[in-house]
Image: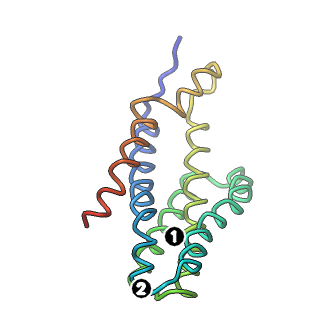
Amino acid sequence: MIPKVLTRDFILLFFAQFTFSFVFQSLIPTLPIYLSRLGSNEVEIGVLVGIFFFCALVLRPFVGRALLRTPEKKFMITGSLLFALASLAYLIAPPFWPLLIVRVFQGIGFAFFHTAAFTLIANISPEFSLPKHRETSFSWPPCHRGQQRLRLRQGPRTAFQC
């Protein structure tokens, strides 16, 4: 028997992950251009881009440990709110130090959301399924791979058109 992968939670997670990642993919190519127009030099741009990924990388093990005690959805909501508020702060935060703080909070939000999202995928996958069926939940072609291709292609294109 093949377990049902496309549950309500799985579909909602797909749309949440797509929306979050679409915004993220829109920021990646446009942020250096935005910062250079604000007068940042190459080193400052590199630090501001890198601090985001550094914070996300450092926090993931701690978020993973906290997810053992706290529901994934709470981390996803908190991460989404942090990421959204930090994205809005771009409008008022001048470079360098205020924007560095914004990027740190955005990295925290990213770590919260993505770690919790992938943990939730693992937890809502049918427990009685074979390992190859559980892998299907992570890479179900029309969903997660398809949304990855779409957001990687359309996110930057949409950002440059705005």
Q: Amino acid at mark 2?
A: Leu
Q: Amino acid at mark 1?
A: Leu
Circles 1 and 2: CB atoms closer than 8 Å: no
Q: Position of residue 160 (x, y in %)?
A: 30, 64
Does 36 appear above or below 17? below
Tell me if mark 2 has few (under 14), some (14-19) or many (20+) residues whose alpha carbon lies within 10 angstroms of its own. few
Q: CA distance from mark 1 to mark 2?
A: 23 Å
Write the residue at 61% across / 20% down: 132
Q: Residue furthest top?
A: 1
- Name which residue lies at 41% across and 87% down: 92
- The residue that label 2 is drawn on is 38
Report the colour scheme.
rainbow
State the residue in front, 159 or 67. 159
In the picture of the structure, the residue carrying the numbered disc 1 is 82
Q: Secondary structure at mark 1?
A: helix
Q: Which mark is residue 58?
A: none
Residue 47's quadrant in the figure?
Answer: bottom right
Tell me residue 106's x, y (percent): 54, 70
Q: Is residue 121 left or right of residue 23?
A: right
The answer to which of marks 1 and 2 sits earlier in the sequence is 2
